[in-house]
Image (spheres, coloured by chain):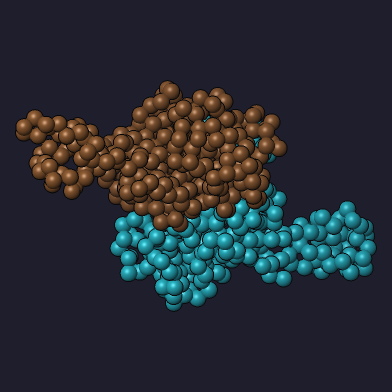
Chain colours: A brown, B cyan
Amino acid sequence: MKFEVTILGSNSALPTTKRYPTAQVLNVLERFFLIDCGEGTQIQMKRFKVPMSRINHIFISHTHGDHIFGLIGLLSTYALQGRKSDLHIYGHRKLEKLITFQLEILETKKQYNIYFHTIFGQETQTLFEDDKVFVQSFPLKHGAMPCAGFLVKEKERPRTLLADLLDQYNIPIRCRQSLKMGKDFVTESGDVIPNKQLTKDPLPTRSYAFCTDTAPYKKIIPIIKNVDLLYHEATFLKTEAKLAKATYHSTSEQAAEIANEAEVKKLIIGHFSTRFKTLDEHLKEAQTVFENTSLAEDGKKFTIELDR
Amino acid sequence: MKFEVTILGSNSALPTTKRYPTAQVLNVLERFFLIDCGEGTQIQMKRFKVPMSRINHIFISHTHGDHIFGLIGLLSTYALQGRKSDLHIYGHRKLEKLITFQLEILETKKQYNIYFHTIFGQETQTLFEDDKVFVQSFPLKHGAMPCAGFLVKEKERPRTLLADLLDQYNIPIRCRQSLKMGKDFVTESGDVIPNKQLTKDPLPTRSYAFCTDTAPYKKIIPIIKNVDLLYHEATFLKTEAKLAKATYHSTSEQAAEIANEAEVKKLIIGHFSTRFKTLDEHLKEAQTVFENTSLAEDGKKFTIELDR
């Protein structure tokens, strides 16, 4: 029942030896999602023991190099490893062009299929969905560059049956599914036993939002409202607010303000400019506004625990 | 007067955390050449303190991903850093297609020019040449994939003037250049003083040859004959000789045999298959045939000293 984010790269455009460009892997109930894929992502996956072959869905926020240059290498590695399972890539239509052109020119022999799914930049767009988890994209504000944030969320769980009471009322197994769905139980004699008497509320759903690269953007607030964990870029400090504005990035303080307003439970800041050797100032600046902030660091894992 | 090779990546197709894919930087008399550019090369350059901005010539052996996937990232970084000086890239014509397509789609704004130079696969082709150094390519044997080796060599130095004797014969400064070029000196009275009396032999030229990816290929012997330093791929051990043959790679023993036959001074083996966790066997196998062998290791520097 894991919900875990592993940071593979925490830096902005120019990588350093300690902070690779953007990439993260999510393990959501054993579904492995890759978000962004900067240069060196496959090496970081090995370094941090990510089960590379279990990733079937790759979400790419936008087509700036520091978010995509590791993708062709990863796809080639999959080909060399003899991967057979389908791979789904979600991103701007330019991404498909870039990747298919390279695979073609390089005559990459692969035994697996790649399915590209275009992110159109609508208010929200459901990209992935199964019985337990969904992933939606939403637009960020990164100047002329179309850029998507991602919301990854568990679906509502079925209600929890109270085993003792089921026995007491002698409820047949065939009726239990509808109880889980919240329906009342009607006895053979026609008596109605309210659902609430036989079940208890399910565990709350967990959620994660990923927002990079972007200027602070109020329109995302209702979408990311109350998430357990928010990753928001904080390329600069407030002393560089002008530069942040000019380049459609955020300061650490602005990231924290978004977290505050969206009433998220925890904030991770990342996508740091190469100019910063240490990040203490980023953390301090954010924590002044939103205390429960952590720094993204390559290799760091953030787990959202189930609230039992 | 440096002649130094820095290994940035020593592994074959699938990178590991300790062995990045192929890339090396040469400092030849303060000319910085990059040979191959696997994924993560720019990060390795930072790690090993290579003066990235001083590289003006990039030589790419062939268009397999593990030799080129770091190139677009490096070019983008140069653009972001505001590089202005020309950059020359030497490689197969596919490389130009790949890179220009990406730069175009990504709308990379750059203030520097990239000049692509096609390697045609002739016996030898001079790619770079100035007053002191030249770089030639020559074909390797890598199956259907056109693949080039590189010979980097100092040009013959001018003869060394014997200062004492110049004074003794009262030889004017304007005549000294022709002495350096090996000409005799004729006095005003018509006497000929032989060049050998006024000069001594220059220091010997130094040379480096880079050979990856390739099956053992005898045709390269006359080209790489007597080089000071030979880098030759040794993807496999002799126990995998069949696999080496099938994939147009070399074993450690075969690399050493080439070194032996070409009578080079020193051999570096590299491009190791990911299957090998340690490389002691590679070294042992090569040294049985050619003793002065070293393993390529990421970050290791090999200096060719001037033989004074």
Q: Which residue shows up at 49% across the image and 52% down it?
A: A300
Q: Is residue B296 above or below residue A291?
A: below
Residue A110 found in image quarter: top left
- Residue B94 location, x and y as percent? 45, 38
Give coordinates of residue A144: x percent, y percent.
Answer: 55, 24
Residue that appears at 51% across and 57% down: B9
Is B249 rendered above or below residue A224? Answer: below
The relative height of residue A141 versus residue B289 in the rendered view (above or below) is above
Residue reaching furthest left?
A: A188
Quarter-wise, where is residue A159 in the image? top left
Q: Is residue B263 left or right of residue A303?
A: right
In depth, the one of B10 and A238 nearer the eye is A238
Closest to the observer: B225 or B274?
A: B274
Say which residue appears at 55% left-offset and 27% top-offset.
Answer: A217
Residue A9 percent location from the top left of the image: 51, 47
Residue B47 in view, yes or no: yes
The spot of residue B113 in percent (x, y) is 63, 34
Outermost residue on the top side: it is: A122
Image height of A219 relative to A76, above or below: above
Q: Residue at x 51, y 51 (%)?
A: A298
Number of numbered labels in the structure image: 0
Residue B45 appears anywhere in the view: no
